[in-house]
Image: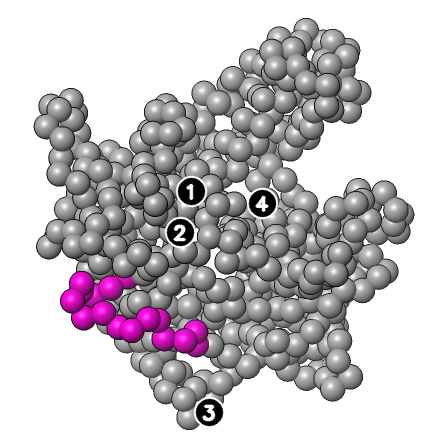
Amino acid sequence: GRRTGRERGEGETHTHTATAAMAEGGEGEEEILFLRTDDRVVLQCTTTIVKAQIKLCLSAEGFGNRLCFLEPTSNAKNVPPDLAICSFVLEQSLSVRALQEMLANTVEKGNESSQGGGHRTLLYGHAILLRHSHSGMYLCCLTTSRSLTDKLSFDVGLQEDASGEACWWTIHPASKQRSEGEKVRVGDDLILVSVSSERYLHLSYASGDLQVDASFMQTLWNMNPICSGCELAEGFLTGGHVLRLFHGHMDECLTVAAFDQGEDQRRLVHYEGGAVCSHARSLWRLEPLRISWSGGHMKWGQYFRIRHVTTGKYLGLDEEKGLLLFDQEKSNIKITSFCFRISKDKIDAGPKRDIEGMGIPEIKYGESMCFVQHVSSGLWLTYAAADTKTVRLGPLKRKAILHQEGHMDDALSLSRSQQEESQASRMIYSTNGLFNQFIKGLDMLSGKNKSSAPVNLPIDMMVLSLQDLISYFQHPEEELAHEEKQTKLRSLKNRQNLFQEEGMIQLVLDSIDRLNMYNSAAHFSEFAGEEAAECWKEVG
């Protein structure tokens, strides 16, 4: 949609002046040198395993699993890291004294955020509040502990609101060159201390695999900005956005087959018009090939991967089969890198080097016409001629292919998804994976595919997912004002439709049916063990 003059003017002049100032080493350097509230960041740390150094990002799903985990990023050339769930917003920064006063007054959450708003530069010694971008929950020190060796540690995870002190962390310099009260610089090694437990945010091997906890042992973290909160130009494409790719200005978008079509069919991509243009299976996420400033404004010619959100697979070129969706672990840069071009004729010699900061906005939603080029082969995204048989059978589908020349009208226009839609599509992806794993596990236990190896049944995550889905699909309260209630009902209907169209409701019901084959917790525990039986009671 069109923006108001004020919005348009502010967004753009701010960005251009900031970029100009950056070039002169003026005030714009603030953006790339220091961290500020409203910035989106990833928390990275490094460790050595069997003499190899690996980099990891703090990450969390939120829905169905509140515990944080670590996403490896060292092998990003071959396996794209799942950065969609590694991003945190620096929501607030307060001095410890101001935080204690605020907590002592136990202000309602509504008034709390009025302190420390705007784009305040982070200072060492201050307390920060980190909001997980995907789930909207807050990074916190939990009261549980899953560590088998460190009895004094606590789990680190997400909580749904920012109440209490568990979700506040103080930020300290690792280097003697920095002192409390100084500005926190991008690239500094940091130590984060939980206000509630006085323990450090820590990378732990305690239980044989890498996990994150709050411990009396230290880990150095790096807070890398992905996206600046105040340099963002409204209406322009930035990295990490979830969007639809429309063929020209027509009502046809790039999508995959419906959920009931089987695995192989769902690896093919096509253009389709009609209802699919509002379904979750037509949503894609653009992932630039970098981590810091990966949420900056996208440039013409900049390389990225295209991730299909509900399946988690990546668009790429198979030498023999052509354009296909690839599993994450097979999505190396050569197979899956694409870029946007203004035309097929004038092609810049490769991408400009990565810049620090947001950069100048170039590609505009709904206006810019983008040709999509596969980087390593130089082929263009285009369509095969429509098959006459399929035209008769229903809505027009044109197979998407990569070709040396393609058609004159291959340019795509981009349409950004609503926040609610992109959140729902990610939930569909994670719920689908979890429930299918659960059904497979139950089948193994019940003897359909009986295996001698112990079966890992994610039943606690399954229970939490069911609880989360119940509240996600909760009807608005009766006492709400009419207009607000109507808005919430519309939003609920959208969420229900998105899940229904991907076959998710059926999948959840199938899982519950599988559990109902057991007539008691004792019966279930014979197959799945005592702990699982406790969860079985909860589902019941």
Which residue is rendered at x = 64% and y = 33% of the image? 461
The residue under label 2 is 335
For residue 323, which quarter of the picture? Answer: top left
Q: Disc 4 marks which amino acid? A: Glu
The residue under label 4 is 61
Q: Earlier in the sequence, mark 4 or mark 2?
A: 4
Q: Disc 1 marks which amino acid? A: Phe
Magenta includes 327? no
Instruction: Give yes or no for contact between labels 2 and 1 (Cβ–Cβ under 8 Å).
Output: yes
Q: Earlier in the sequence, mark 2 or mark 1?
A: 1
Do we see residue 510 in this rendering? Answer: yes
Magenta includes 349? yes
Label 2 crowd bin: few (<14), some (14–19), many (20+), radius 10 Å:
many
Name the secondary structure under disc 2: helix
Q: Position of residue 460 (x, y in %)?
A: 68, 30
Q: Earlier in the sequence, mark 2 or mark 3?
A: 3
Q: Earlier in the sequence, mark 3 or mark 1?
A: 3
> Which mark's residue is nearer the viewer, 4 or 2?
2
Q: Position of residue 271 (x, y in %)?
A: 22, 40
User: Which residues are the magenta region?
Assistant: 340-355
> Which mark's residue is nearer the viewer, 2 or 3?
2
Task: Tell me which colouring the rendered structure shows.
Answer: one colour
Residue lying at the far top in this picture: please name it: 519
> Could you say which disc has been placed on residue 25 in the image?
3
Name the secondary structure under disc 4: loop
Q: Main secondary structure of the magenta part?
A: loop
Name the secondary structure under disc 3: loop
Q: Disc 2 marks which amino acid? A: Ile
